[in-house]
Image: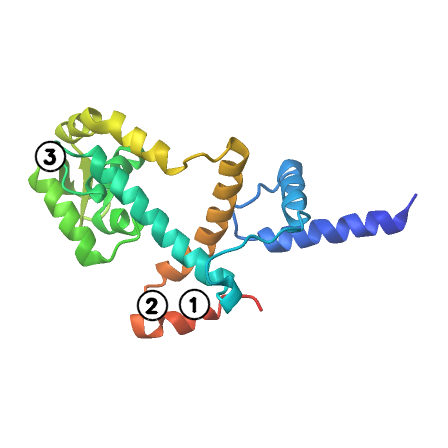
Amino acid sequence: MNYRLVKDVIDLVQEFESQNEGSTSYDTSVEGFKNWISTNNNTIVNEPNWEGKENGRSAESVINTLIVHMNRYAKSYSKSAIVGSDFSTQEDFIYLINLKAFGEMSKMDLIKKNVHEKPVGMQIINRLINQGWIEQRNSKTDKRSKVISISETGLQALGNQMDKIRQATSIVTGNLSQNEKMELIRLLNKLDDFHQPIYDRNIDTEDLLREALKNIKR
C-alpha cells in the first residue's frame, strides 16, 4: 500500500474540511470534495484584463465595481417588470416573495432576511400593510410582539406580476452556461457566508470596517 498517497489524501480532506467549515460553498460529501478539488486546482493560466489594470487597479476594486453594476442592472429590470402595477419598488415584491416562501415571521426577521437597516425595512413593511398585502397579528409565543404574513390580496398582487418578475430574474444571469451559474452560486454563497455573521452582529458603523477586517485570513 502506498502510505504516502493515503497520507496526502487525508491531509487534503482535512484541508477541505477546514476551509469549508461554517460554509455552504461545498457539500460535505464526496461530490462536494471533488468539486472543491476541481475548483482549487484550476490554475488561472490567462488572468483576465480589466480597466485600469495597467495602472495598478486591484482585482478587489474590479469585483466591488462589478457587483455594484450587477445590482443596478437587476434593479432596472425589476423596475421594468413592475411598470403599470401597484408595486412601488423592487423591494415590495421581494418582501412578499420572502413571506410567501418562508411563512409568517417578525418584522425584524423579514428586514434582516433582506439585509436592510430597520428604518428602511419598516418603511417597506408599512407600505405593504397599507396596501393590504401584509397582515399582522400578535405572536403566539410572545404577546408583546407581532408577526406578519402575506395576505390573500398580497398573493393575488404577486401572482399577477410573477411572470414579468421571473423574466427580470432570468435576464440577470444573461448568457452564463449552467455550469457557470452553479460556480457563481458557490462563489456568492462563500461571500455570503463570510459577510452574514458580520452583519448579524449589528456593529456600529464607525467600528464596522475595523471589525470586518479581523475576519479576513491573511
Q: Which mark is residue 212?
A: 1
In the rendered image, the quadrant that contains the C terminus is bottom right
In this picture, residue 183 sits left or right of residue 99: right
Query: Which x, y percent locates residue 52?
Result: 47, 63
Q: Name the one closer to the observer, 76 or 36.
A: 76
Q: How many marks?
A: 3
Q: Name the image quarter holding residue 18.
A: bottom right
Amino acid carrying mark 2 in the image: Ile
Residue at the image point whose x is 43% and y is 67% from the top = 212
Secondary structure under badge 3?
loop
Cα–Cα gap, marks 3 and 1: 39 Å
Residue type at mark 3: give it: Asp
Which residue is labeled 3 in the image?
86
Can the viewer see residue 113 in this picture?
no
Tell which tag, 3 or 1, sits nearer the viewer: 3
Disc number placed over residue 203 in the picture, else none: 2
Query: CB of mark 2 within 8 Å of CB of mark 3?
Result: no
Quadrant in the picture for the N terminus: top right
- 9 or 182: nearer the eye? 182
| 49 displayed left or right of 141 | right
Give amino acid for label 1: Ala
From the viewer's side, name the closer residue of 45 and 128. 45
To which quarter of the image does residue 148 belong?
top left
Of tags 2 and 1, which is closer to the observer?
Answer: 1
CB contact under 8 Å: marks 2 and 1? yes
Q: Residue at x 63, y 51 (%)?
A: 46
Tell me if 150 is positioned left or right of 170 in this view: left
Distance from the alpha carbon under mark 2 to that under mark 1: 9 Å
Q: Residue 169, percent across and down?
A: 33, 34
Contact? badges 3 and 1 (CB < 8 Å) = no
Q: Is residue 108 above or below residue 204?
A: above
